Amino acid sequence: MRLTALFANRLEEGVFSEGDIQGSYPLGHRRELAMTNDGDPVAGTEASRIISNFVGLYSAIFTALTTIITFGLAITAIPNSGAGCTENCVEYPYLNTLSEFPRDYLWMLPAMLLVVVYVALVVSIHTYAAQHKKIYSRIGLSFALIAAGILLSDYFIQFSVVPISLMNHETDGIALLTQYNPHGTFIVLEELGYLLMSLSFLFLAPVFTNKGRLASVVRWVFIAGFVLTMVFLAVISINYGLDREDRFEVAVISIDWLVLIINGVLLSLVFRSQVKARSEPSGQPQS
């Protein structure tokens, strides 16, 4: 008991250091403590940071390029239904849409690649983040993973299920699944996926605070993307309620894709500066 009291008093007086306390543990426990305190022991090494910067550089470039391709294909394949359709619109139950395959579906292929590359980019941002800001990047990564899962499922099901079902005259439930239904599951899942993506933007933004002028622009682009998404969601919901059709879907996709194009380019410059700085023996990371 006296030894315990003495140890407690010494600890309160600050006589013992953290290293002394960890040294009293067995070797295996000390390794576990070191890993726990660092959070990610591998990410802290110089070699892994160089690799993560290269991954960040190329994932940022591919994010921008893939988004541009997806955006271009999507603009040329706007379904002739929903709020924006004025004439020759496809009506419920949307069974006469097979003639639009594959044109109206091609953009989904790069869109699936896009969300995968975006997750890789967010992982690189998480590694780039300062240790005390990794809580924000972890939350952003979590939302990005959820968004990617929703959007991948949505696009894969739409591309793989709906056309072949129409070809085989298996039409039960197609009205609920098809992209031509402005009240269907495809539109709603897109809204949810890109809404969560914009939420990931919000939590990635703090990572780029006090990182230089270029990083500051990245931060404000992320914040602007989230704010614009919330504004459009509020305005469209107030005016149309649940009968918003595909209005918010078009808005949130356009906003998120523009953010990915702009910040894809900017982040490629940020990671390029990191790669250049770490390749110089006496260089300091720049943004």
Image (cartoon, helix red, strand yellow):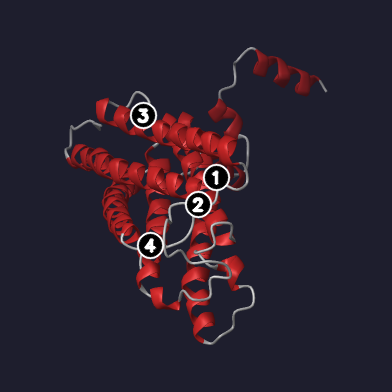
Amino acid at circle 1:
Arg
Q: Which percent across, then down, holds residue 188?
A: 57, 54
Q: Which residue is mark 1?
A: 31
Residue placed under numbered mark 4 in the picture = 113
Say few, some or many: other residues with alpha carbon within 10 Å of mark 1 (under 14 / 14 to 19 / 20 or more): few
> Residue 128, how many percent across, how many down?
37, 39
118 left or right of 13?
A: left
Mark 3 highlights which residue?
A: 220
Secondary element type, mark 1:
helix
Q: Residues within 10 Å of mark 4 (few under 14, many from 20)?
A: some
Residue at 36% x, 64% y is: 107
Which residue is label 2 attached to? 246
- Label 2 to label 4, Cα distance in Å? 23 Å
The local secondary structure at tag 2 comes to loop
Q: Is residue 65 above or below residue 50?
A: below
Say which of marks 4 and 1 sits in front: 4
Residue type highlighted by circle 2: Asp
Q: Amino acid at mark 3?
A: Trp
Question: Measuring 77% from the left and 23% from the top, which residue is drawn there?
Answer: 4
Q: Residue at x 48, y 65 (%)?
A: 155
Considering only order in the chain, which callout, 1 or 3, is on the residue closer to the N terminus? 1
